[in-house]
């Protein structure tokens, strides 16, 4: 703990009473008096006039102490507390989740042998990933025939998890507009002020007619400082609308400085997200400051007590004389 003065210049006022004492004339109280011509004879020839009573040393000492406390209060003393350090999240991480019709395909084998849908497997892995990114602002984009920001960037990960639980296949349409999803992500990142920008796009299909070609959208995002990781999910040998366009996903990741991964089952998908988590460690810069607590009220309170005491001293003396 350290003490400091925010307005130390106020201490220059300390010698002000001495300057005023020597620069200004002495105070004389005017009152009605009776002039007596023979007063001089009564006092004696050559006798000096009576001197005005001088204040007692205690009164002078209390007055000086009161002035010192008043000046000290004007100097705004503060108590500087020990440093306080707080971690602030340094990344914006946007999770893009494909909700096309093929995400309801139940071909994901869990360790126990049970088959779950691709969306269920993705949700489980995303929840684990979200739990590990405690210091980041996370957002969620879902896409199908259109792309939507389901959750803007937030530190409230409980809300994000709740919205993730409500996702269902085809809720954004049956198709897969990857380019539109990346374009929406770029606009979302553009509004933020954080430098660390990361997007993880999960899909089990190929782009089916985005207004902006996926690679072009990735180049725009890269100019905004967004790094994109793409993850393909499902059977790479599938054909038709469910076919995976792995070369396109690789091109997207390359254009945005990221990488592409493929997962054929929930275990592989979980390993991919853990790998990305390790590659893109959550930056948590610290913000440190020392709290400053004003304590001017203590010298100001001392001044008030002494001032009241000085005002009451004559009355106290009078009472003492009467008592004696």
Image (cartoon, rainbow, N blue to C red):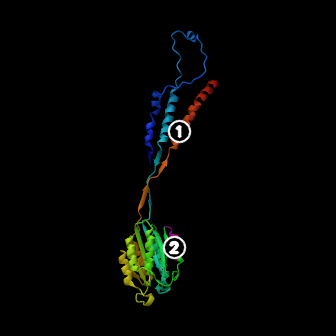
x then y, percent, for residue 184: 45, 75
x then y, percent, for residue 131: 47, 71
Quadrant containing the C terminus in the rendered view: top right
Element class at badge 2: helix
Q: The magenta stretch spans which residues?
A: 155-164
Residue indicated by mark 2 = 161
Tell which of 270 and 219 is nearer to you: 219
Asked if the residue under mark 1 is in contact with the one under mark 2, i.e. CB atoms within 8 Å, the reply is: no
Outermost right residue: 323
- 186 displayed left or right of 150: left
- 201 displayed left or right of 163: left
Q: Residue at x 49, y 49 (%)?
A: 293
3D distance between C-alphas at marks 2 and 1: 57 Å
Q: Is residue 227 visible?
A: no
Residue 160 painted magenta: yes
Residue indicated by mark 1 = 302
x then y, percent, for residue 90: 42, 65
Residue 283 painted magenta: no
Question: Could you say which quadrant of the image residue 307 lies in?
Answer: top right
């Amino acid at each position: 703990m350290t003490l400091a003065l925010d307005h130390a210049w106020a201490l220059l006022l300390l010698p002000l009473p001495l300057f005023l004492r020597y620069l200004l004339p002495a105070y004389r109280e005017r009152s009605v008096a009776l002039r007596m011509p023979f007063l001089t004879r009564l006092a004696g020839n050559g006798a000096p006039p009576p001197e005005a009573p001088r204040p007692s040393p205690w009164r002078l000492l209390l007055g000086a102490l009161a002035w010192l406390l008043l000046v000290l209060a004007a100097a705004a003393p503060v108590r500087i507390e020990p440093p306080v350090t707080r971690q602030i999240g340094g990344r914006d991480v946007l999770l893009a989740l494909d909700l096309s019709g093929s995400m309801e395909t139940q071909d994901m084998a869990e360790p126990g042998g049970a088959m779950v849908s691709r969306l269920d497997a993705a949700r489980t892995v995303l929840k684990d990933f979200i739990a590990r990114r405690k210091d980041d602002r996370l957002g969620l984009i879902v896409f199908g025939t259109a792309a939507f920001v389901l959750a803007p960037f937030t530190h409230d990960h409980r809300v994000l998890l709740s919205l993730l639980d409500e996702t269902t296949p085809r809720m954004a349409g049956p198709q897969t507009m990857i380019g539109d999803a990346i374009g929406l992500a770029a606009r979302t990142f553009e509004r933020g002020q954080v430098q660390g920008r990361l997007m993880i796009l999960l899909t089990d299909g190929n782009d089916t007619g985005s207004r902006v070609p996926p690679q072009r959208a990735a180049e725009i995002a890269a100019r905004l400082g967004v790094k994109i990781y793409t993850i393909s999910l499902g059977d790479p040998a599938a054909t038709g609308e469910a076919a995976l366009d792995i070369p396109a996903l690789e091109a997207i990741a390359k254009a945005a400085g990221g990488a592409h991964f493929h997962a054929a089952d929930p275990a592989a998908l979980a390993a991919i997200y853990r790998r990305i988590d390790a590659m893109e460690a959550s930056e948590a810069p610290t913000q440190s400051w020392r709290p400053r607590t004003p304590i001017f009220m203590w010298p100001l309170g001392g001044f008030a007590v002494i001032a009241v005491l000085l005002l009451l001293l004559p009355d106290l003396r009078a009472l003492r004389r009467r008592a004696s």
